[in-house]
Amino acid sequence: MKISTKGRYALRLMLDLALHHTGEPVSLKDIARRQEISDKYLEQIISVLNKAKYVKSVRGAQGGYILTKRPEEYTVGMILRLTEGSLAPVACVEDEMQCKRMHDCATLMVWKKMNDAINEVVDSITLADLVDFERQRAGEYII
Amino acid sequence: MKISTKGRYALRLMLDLALHHTGEPVSLKDIARRQEISDKYLEQIISVLNKAKYVKSVRGAQGGYILTKRPEEYTVGMILRLTEGSLAPVACVEDEMQCKRMHDCATLMVWKKMNDAINEVVDSITLADLVDFERQRAGEYII
DNA sequence: CTGTATTCATACCGTGTCAATAGGATTTAA
DNA sequence: TTAAATCCTATTGACACGGTATGAATACAG
């Protein structure tokens, strides 16, 4: 019951891009250095985000990546689902017709409530929220 | 981000025990048959529940297992945590001092909210709730 | 036009976990 | 004494995780 590094790194990557959102592309090497994550591994992760058009890539020297939308348009749920796959705690919550016990399985209620609770959280937080949170936190340290 | 079979089977196993709570021990073979789960695999799972004193075992012929407490005294969270381990979506939510980025990691907020949401669900549902739910459901079919 | 910085694509790999299966030892009611 | 049950431990195949490695393609700077 854990979010893997793929999802966690993707979120940090996107947050890093949002924090350094100047119009200029941000190179993966810079992100990897700041986030202390293997740049080679980040390549694989951002490739997914790129194919989904969550980021735009600029090739060649001085290249890098730019967010395609405004930070408030990305929810945490979008990013996690893209990189992690479904966030449902069990398969039967999503794939109807998967389990023949569906109709007399009381535990299904548990999984549905869990699923709803998780979705409620990740779909209500945007990248912009995280940016605000981090900027505000940085302010505290200055004082 | 999935609950494994260990946790899911444990929950169904405990629910089965609660539904057949007559005072007489219930054999694993019966549970396995009703739940359509490999009895050999269930052995390993119930062994954990037994060691934690969630169930009492009766050895020998006509033996089996009995709940040690009333169904309303078991939360889903207790059962899942015992068999799955922690339900936290990431390690840093629990193990303080695990990650040196703790203090400037905005994503931690996401994980904490997720953790709270999950715990709220699993800790507020008891085995008795599931029993009621299942009995009520059975009633619907009779009509 | 050349060198260098960057993204892109793909292959590979060691480790660990999952989800069982297997085999037998031990206990006990009938 | 036998059959039914729990208990214990080892093994296994498949797959996911968390990366590394290699090199090709692209494009900017000088």
Image (cartoon, coloured by chain):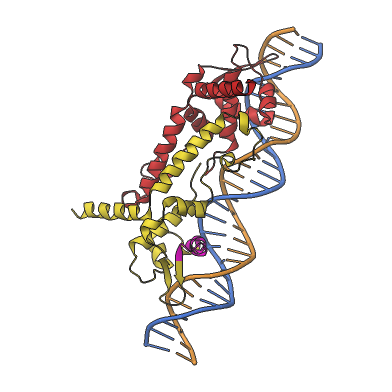
Chain colours: A yellow, B red, C orange, D blue
Is B23 on the left-hand or right-hand side of D13? Answer: left
Magenta stretch in the rendered image = A41-55
Q: Is residue A110 above or below residue A28?
A: above
Task: Choose between B137 and B105: the one closer to the eye.
Answer: B137
Give B33 or A123, whichever is nearer the viewer. Answer: A123
Query: Majority secondary structure of the magenta segment?
Result: helix
- Looking at the image, residue A117 sits to the left or right of residue A132; the answer is right
Asked whether residue B92 appears in the rendered view, the answer is no
- Residue furthest out toward the front: B143
Determine whether B25 is above or below C19 in the image.
above
Residue B14 visible in the picture: yes
Q: Nearer the viewer, residue D23 or B1?
A: B1
Residue occupying the point 47% across, 26% down? B75
In the rendering, at what x and y percent does residue B47 appear? 59, 26
Q: Nearer the viewer, residue A95 or B90?
A: A95
Residue at (48% x, 28% y) in the render: B78
Q: Residue at x 45, y 33 (%)?
A: B121
Residue A51 x/y as whole percent: 52, 64
Residue A21, image quadrant: bottom left
Q: Is residue B76 left or right of residue B30?
A: left
* Residue C4 in the image: above or below residue B51: below
Instruction: Give the left or right position of residue A115, taking residue D5 as reference.
Output: left
Instruction: Specify whether residue A44 is painted magenta.
Output: yes
How far from the left and from the top, in percent, is residue B91? 43, 43
Image coordinates of residue A87 in percent, x first then y, are 51, 46
